[in-house]
């Protein structure tokens, strides 16, 4: 393959890759299996805590408990599928108004499977309420099982932790829809 | 023999790379991963999103820059903020007095320490020449210059395309954009909706919305103002 052909193919492939990444989230985020951060590579989830605070620990353990209400088999581990951190990341830039973040830092582009997730709890934008942290832990670990966000139209009783911007004692957990979505996602 | 996956990975790295001065890290020009954010704010209507914004503008992207690098291995790794320079074409709403800036730097994604790019939520990376409407929070007082801003919410950006107005973020036909004409034929109507929301904010009919968590943690920076 000539260098010119290779450059043209690379440019075309880059455009295609961008479209693959951009198209889903430009339209709908979806829910089960469509978190766009990739679905996990299998149902076994080792969750590693990296010197996190006690509230971060509360959040992580609660998130694990929620995952274990589904077909996922999540447990604390010293390394594995999910690396959890917490810190005062601040309120600047992409952290503006953001309490937590989940991204996939080792993905298989070809089949949209994630091998390693990174969860970061932002202490700068969190209260000291254990309930708020349970919501956050459920939410971020829900993303590691492939869940996207929920909305008022599909969560009329406001009890899913996958709602964005909703922190109440009523939505600390997955609801039935969330559980069904994870269980229906091919892994 | 090259695999498709291998070619895609190579394309993501080689399709237009850049690196900061003195650094061997090559930052990608396109995002390769997506980050989900748990946001404190959400808005049900355009008026409240406008009133809560510090600045609402129509603007054009003139530059992409590598911003501040922060973070350590202990907190998940260093990240470099990706910023776009927005030339402000029209000020639709300004919450506080004073002269509006002519341009601002808007955070839009980031790179990790390996140079891999991430888009946040559904905020595709803008490119130079893109025009859109932006609902901004700022200026960020952690910088010495007063031109660093962030979106007030991930759905606070709409991009003008040949087909109309594309709403960014995790939009699922709920919230402030419902009922707003976003078709190519409705750009004038769309701008009229923004103007009406701005007027409601100016007159106090539309209120500033603070995150609900501020009731329990009013000291948070996100609760100020």
Image (tube, rainbow, N blue to C red):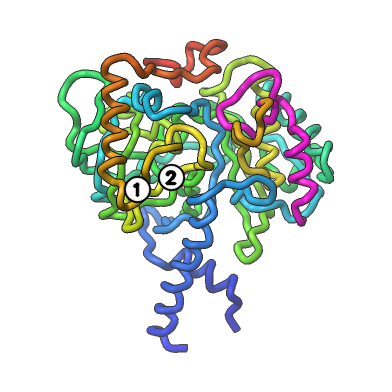
Whether residue B78 is visible: no
Q: Is residue A34 left or right of residue A69?
A: left
SS assignment at label 2: loop
Helix, strand or loop for disc 1? strand
Residue A10 in view (yes/no): yes
For the point 54% across and 54% down, the residue is A24
Instruction: Please tell me whether residue B215 is drawn above or below residue B36 in the rendered image.
Output: above
Residue B168, which numbered label?
2
Q: Chain of mark 2?
A: B
Q: Which residue is mark 1?
A: B159
- Dot placed on the residue nearer the N-terminal end, 2 or 1: 1
Indicate the position of residue A5 as horizontal and vertical percent values: 42, 84
Q: Camera-side residue: A128 or B53? A: B53
Residue in front for this viewpoint, B13 or A125: A125
**Which portion, as a residue range, is magenta?**
A158-187
Asked if disc 2 and disc 1 are in contact, CB closer than 8 Å, the reply is: yes
The residue depicted at 60 percent of the width and 35 percent of the height is A151
User: The C terminus of chain A lies in which quarter of the figure?
Assistant: bottom right
In front of the other: B66 or B210: B210
Residue A124 appears left or right of A82: left
Q: Main secondary structure of the magenta part?
A: loop
Q: Give residue B48's position: percent from left, percent from top.
A: 40, 23
What residue sits 53% from the left and 42% below the top? B172
Q: CA distance from mark 2 to mark 1?
A: 7 Å
Decide: is B22 above or below A120. Answer: below
Quadrant of the rendered image containing residue A4? bottom left
Instruction: Confirm whether the magenta stretch covers residue A175.
Output: yes
- Considering every residue shown, the one lying at the far left of the view is B99
- Give the x, y percent position of residue A86: 60, 30
On whether residue A184 falls in the magenta region, the answer is: yes
Which chain does the numbered disc 1 sit on?
A: B
Q: Which mark is residue A126?
A: none
């Amino acid at each position: 393959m000539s260098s010119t052909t290779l450059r043209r193919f690379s440019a075309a492939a880059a455009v295609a890759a961008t479209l693959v990444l951009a198209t889903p989230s430009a339209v709908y985020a979806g829910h089960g299996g469509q978190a766009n951060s990739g679905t996990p590579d299998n149902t076994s989830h080792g969750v590693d805590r990296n010197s996190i605070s006690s509230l971060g620990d509360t959040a992580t353990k609660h998130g694990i408990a929620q995952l274990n209400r589904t077909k996922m088999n999540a447990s604390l581990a010293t390394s594995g599928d999910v690396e959890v951190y917490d810190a005062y990341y601040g309120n600047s830039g992409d952290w503006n108004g953001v309490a937590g973040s989940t991204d996939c830092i080792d993905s298989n582009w070809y089949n949209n499977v994630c091998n390693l997730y990174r969860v970061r709890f932002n202490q700068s934008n969190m209260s000291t309420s254990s309930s708020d942290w349970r919501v956050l832990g459920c939410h971020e670990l829900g993303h590691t099982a492939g869940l996207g966000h929920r909305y008022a139209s599909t969560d009329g009783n406001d009890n899913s932790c996958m709602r964005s911007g909703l922190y109440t004692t009523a939505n600390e957990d997955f609801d039935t829809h969330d559980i069904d979505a994870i269980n229906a996602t091919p892994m | 023999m090259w695999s498709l996956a291998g070619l895609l990975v190579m394309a993501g790295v080689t399709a237009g790379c850049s690196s900061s001065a003195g650094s061997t890290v090559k930052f990608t020009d396109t995002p390769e991963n997506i980050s989900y954010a748990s946001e404190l704010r959400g808005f049900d209507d355009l008026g409240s999103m406008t009133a809560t914004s510090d600045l609402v503008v129509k603007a054009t992207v003139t530059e992409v820059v590598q911003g501040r690098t922060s973070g350590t291995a202990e907190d998940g790794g260093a990240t470099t903020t990706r910023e776009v320079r927005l030339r402000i074409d029209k000020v639709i709403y300004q919450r506080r007095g004073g002269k509006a800036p002519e341009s601002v730097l808007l955070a839009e994604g980031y790179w990790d320490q390996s140079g891999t790019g991430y888009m946040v939520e559904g905020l595709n990376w803008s490119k130079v020449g893109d025009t859109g409407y932006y609902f901004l929070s700022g200026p960020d007082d952690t910088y010495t210059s007063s031109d660093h801003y962030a979106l007030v919410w991930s759905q606070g950006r709409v991009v003008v395309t040949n087909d109309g107005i594309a709403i960014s973020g995790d939009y699922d036909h709920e919230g402030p954009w419902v009922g707003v004409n976003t078709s190519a034929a409705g750009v004038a109507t769309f701008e009229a909706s923004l103007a009406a929301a701005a007027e409601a904010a100016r007159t106090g009919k539309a209120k500033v919305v603070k995150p609900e968590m501020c009731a329990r943690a009013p000291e948070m920076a996100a609760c100020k103002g």
